[in-house]
Amino acid sequence: MAAAEELAGFRIEQDSILTIGVFDGVHLGHKYLISRLVQEALKRHMLAGVITFRNHPLELLSPKAGICMLTDLEERIRLIKNEGVDFVIPLTFSQELAQTSARGFAELLQKHLKMKGLVLGPDFALGCNREGDIKTLTEIGEEMGFTVTAVTPLKLDTLTPSSTAIRNALTEGDMDKAAKLAGRPFSLTGTVVKGAGRGTTIGFPTANLKIEPCHAMPADGVYATWAHVNGDTYPAMTNIGTCPTFGELPRTVEVFILDFSKNIYGKELRVDFLKRVREEKKFKSVEELKHQMSQDIIKGKAFLESQAKKEVKR
């Protein structure tokens, strides 16, 4: 569907201030930009709107880049709405949109969303060949009657929050860094499906998560996690990897929920990753693996209990 058709499906009754981007991960940098958007909209008595993309533009412009998303579209929209905006509009980044001029896209925003201002990062660019940088958009805005505000990126000590930085932290298994950049623990959400049953056989029954193949994942290993299912939260240990002790198998996400025995097949389960307890390892025997898993649980449970106490004190 063309952008014009998608935009035409939304009825905006009031002038708006917009920001535009993928906002993958909705990290602290995104939140800072959106907060500036909301402030500007309130000051001017207009609506604050966010345009995000259903698909990452690089999927079309540079397919070999192999971008893995930190959040799916539904989660992204939910997180953006939590920042106090009036509306979120997802657009499909199509070949037609990629070839639309900056002026042409601005015209669409004015026609369908009553756009009177843009709040953007300093490196933002839109339109064919990224022609619509801040300088060009400012010039177009002066002609067409909308403002452009460039927001300096947020910095956290020596870190600058970005989706790429979070992906790099995940690759390193550094969940603390990923959480600092995002402002919350990294999470995976999937449907619980039947696995090979190895966990039950060795005394550690796990919930196997079906995760979309294009979703970013932490490095292989064992993690202390919180599991959220049916509205309740439980301490859990989560293994990501290929189960090398049993031979090289497809990569899986297996969640061992502590002190839990309910049947949750087919249920949606969200896992928050707090700490990598160890890397994945091939053991000489199943008995050695079981011993290590018991040690992992002791370490993970102690860590989760300490985290829970910190939360209570806040």
Image: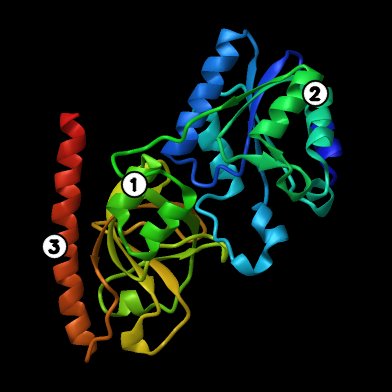
Residue 211, given in percent of the width and then of the height, sits at 52, 62
Is 233 placed left or right of 249 in the picture?
A: left
Is 201 placed left or right of 291 in the picture?
A: right
Of tags 2 and 3, the one toward the viewer is 2
Of tags 1 and 2, the one toward the viewer is 2
**What residue is disc 1 on?**
179
Mark 2 crowd level (few <14, some 14–19, many ≥20, 10 Å Cα): some
**What residue is disc 2 on?**
110
Q: Residue drawn at (57%, 41%), measured in percent from left and top?
A: 123
Asked if labels 1 and 3 touch by Cβ distance under 8 angstroms, the answer is: no
**What residue is disc 3 on?**
298
Is 295 placed left or right of 115 in the picture?
A: left
Residue type pointed to by label 1: Ala
Q: Residue drawn at (28%, 62%), measured in percent from left and top?
A: 223
Residue in front for this viewpoint, 11 or 297: 11
User: If you read the primary sequence from the N terminus, does the residue marked by circle 2 or circle 3 appear first?
Assistant: 2
Q: Element under label 1?
A: helix
Quarter where residue 183 is shown: top left
